Amino acid sequence: MLTAFAAYLALHFLAYVVLLREWPLFRSERAIFLYHFVPGAAAGLAGLTYAACAMPATIRFAELVLALSAHGIYSISFLELWSLAQGGYSLSILRSIASGDANGADARFAHLERIGETKQRERIFGLVRLGLIAERDGTIALTPRGGLVALLSDSLLKWVDPDGGSETA
């Protein structure tokens, strides 16, 4: 099972690098996320079925956990690198500052401000579409679903780091 899963990860990566990265669809964060989530979930279900039917099941289940952990690490790393490659906005800010310093002039941020506003609108639209927030009278508020996600995220953070990052001397 592990060999097959390693081959799957290699093919998944090669398919993106060789073919899919040029497709306009794969330039959106949502499409990249789904490109990783859907096959990962399908592989998890298939692996769980296989582990349940194979003998000894405990060994197969351990292999499944290892394979899905590898998929998680691969996907998070891939998504992070993809996001950094799309990080033209942050790089544009740094270029504007450097260009302004080199020319002895103030950096010009008007065009970057418009890009930032567009990015913010897209993020808000995505959260509204997911039902996590709602816009009312010019303000943004959590929906009940958004409140649940926030509560779960906060609980996970407190479970992982009960001290909240405080250093004890």
Image (cartoon, rainbow, N blue to C red):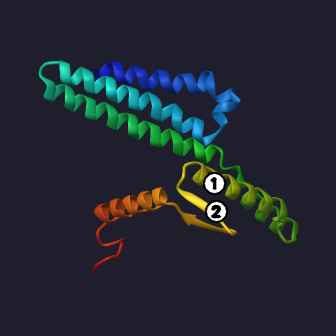
Choose top left, top right, bottom left or bottom right for residue 45: top left
Q: Residues within 10 Å of mark 1 (few under 14, many from 20)?
A: few
C-alpha distance separating marks 2 and 1: 13 Å
Image location (x, y in percent) of residue 145 = 46, 56
How many labels sit on residues? 2
Image location (x, y in percent) of residue 116 = 73, 59
Q: Which residue is mark 1?
A: 123
CB within 8 Å, label 2 to label 1 = no
Q: Secondary structure at mark 2?
A: strand
Residue nearer the viewer, 84 or 48: 48
- Give the left or right position of residue 32, taking residue 107 as reference: left
Dot 2 amino acid type: Glu
- Give the left or right position of residue 5, taking residue 120 as reference: left
Front tag of 2 and 1: 2
Q: Is residue 20 shown above or below 88?
A: above
Q: Residues within 10 Å of mark 2 (few under 14, many from 20)?
A: few
Residue nearer the viewer, 143 or 73: 143
Q: Residue at x 28, y 81 (%)?
A: 169
Choose top left, top right, bottom left or bottom right for residue 20: top right
Dot 1 amino acid type: Arg
- Give the left or right position of residue 118, taking residue 3 as reference: right
Choose top left, top right, bottom left or bottom right for residue 86: top right
Image location (x, y in percent) of residue 60 = 20, 25
Image location (x, y in percent) of residue 161 = 31, 65
Residue nearer the viewer, 53 or 75: 53
Q: Residue at x 64, y 62 (%)?
A: 135
Upstream in sequence: badge 2 or badge 1:
1
Q: Which residue is mark 2?
A: 135
Q: Residue at x 20, y 32 (%)?
A: 62
